[in-house]
Amino acid sequence: MSKKIFSGVQPTGNLHLGNYIGAIKNFVDLQNNKDNSCIFCVVDLHAITVIQDPIELKNNIRETAAAFIASGIDPKNSIIFNQSLVPAHSEGSWILGCVARMGWLNRMTQFKEKAGKDKEKASVGLYIYPVLMASDILLYDATHVPVGDDQKQHLELCRDIAQKFNNEYKCKDFLTPPEPLIQKHFSRIMSLKNGTKKMSKSDIAEGSRINLTDTEDEIVKKIKKAKTDNDTLPGNEEGLKGRPEAENLIGIYSSLSNQNVADTLNEFGGKNFSDLKNKLSEIIVTKLSPISKEIKKLLSDKNYIDQILEDGAAKAEGISSKKVKKIKEIVGF
């Protein structure tokens, strides 16, 4: 069965191994299935829910697009664009925001986490951005959306908005409630310094993450210094319980090797972490070095990246503007 895939990545800069394994690697696999049609969006409108440096944001938009392309997403086979180039996203968001309910948004746990204790100082955009996310998805009649655990609630909201719109305006099946594509394995890559914390660009410890633009020497050094425990590696998955650092390194190796955890544990069970780290450094360098070099090459030609985003935006506009036009007709504009 063919799937219409939509997914977005925020242009926050410094994309790392966690972004690659948890999202971009999966995007490439989805694109390479000939039955799928894929749209990958650099969601720059979402990025400004917190204040951004304008020059840095522009560079981060290009870097995110370059990371997509360098990782194997082909602009000839998939649509790649940045959200702000397509006005339909904002226009659709306003109309759908009039369908969404405050009670629904009040239940969004991610807003509570990001806003912290002083939510009165959070931007309105941060509060309502799940409605924009719904607009992003629904304007393309996406049937499936790759999501991590932190976005499942937002996708449920998207489904609720679609169903309420269809019911309120008596237009059955007009907006398609999307299904989640949940990556069962390796969706969360943890910090190299703390196996209980997600790998993040905001972590002040540079050694906590492998950046997609790191050199081979930097990768080797970071893996060498990655936190471990004092035991040898277990021979089965039961033995990983309560050992977050071991579980994380085994997971990274398994994902990049395209094998399951059981096979990795068969390979390293009873061995020391140094054996795993040596092999892990090799495979990360093998997988990421070509991507890193290609990102740097692509970013040296800003006009090329901008042209890909503009071409993608023209294709995206061709789809989304038609949907918004129909939405406006349905609501009576």
Image: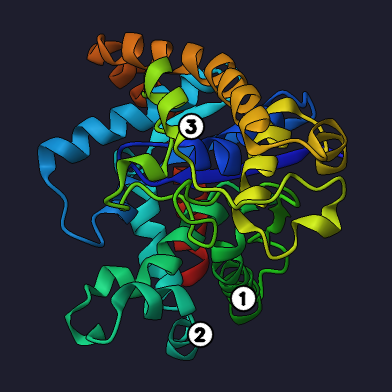
- Left or right: where 90 falls relative to 59: right
Q: Residue 143: x, y in percent?
A: 70, 50
Q: Residue furthest front?
A: 230
Image mark for residue 160: 1
- Left or right: where 109 falls relative to 4: left
Q: Earlier in the sequence, mark 2 or mark 3?
A: 2
Q: Earlier in the sequence, mark 2 or mark 1?
A: 2
Q: Is residue 162 above or below residue 251?
A: below
Q: Amino acid at mark 3?
A: Lys
Q: Is residue 315 above or below residue 16?
A: above
Q: Nearer the viewer, residue 259 or 81?
A: 259
Q: Residues within 10 Å of mark 2 (few under 14, many from 20)?
A: few
- Left or right: where 99 falls relative to 23: left
Q: Amino acid at mark 2?
A: Trp
Q: How many marks are shown on the rendered structure?
A: 3
Image mark for residue 104: 2
Q: Nearer the viewer, residue 65 or 259?
A: 259
In the picture of the structure, the residue carrying the numbered disc 3 is 224
Which marked residue is nearer to the observer: mark 2 or mark 1? 2
Quick one: SS at disc 3?
helix
Q: State whether residue 187 appears in this view.
A: no
Image mark for residue 330: none
Q: Residue 62: x, y in percent?
A: 30, 27
Question: Which residue sits at x=59%, y=38%?
Answer: 21
Q: Earlier in the sequence, mark 1 or mark 3?
A: 1
Determine the CA span between mark 2 and mark 1: 9 Å
Q: Residues within 10 Å of mark 1 (few under 14, many from 20)?
A: some
Question: Which residue sits at x=39%, y=36%?
Answer: 15
Give the position of the N terminus as an image quadrant.
top right
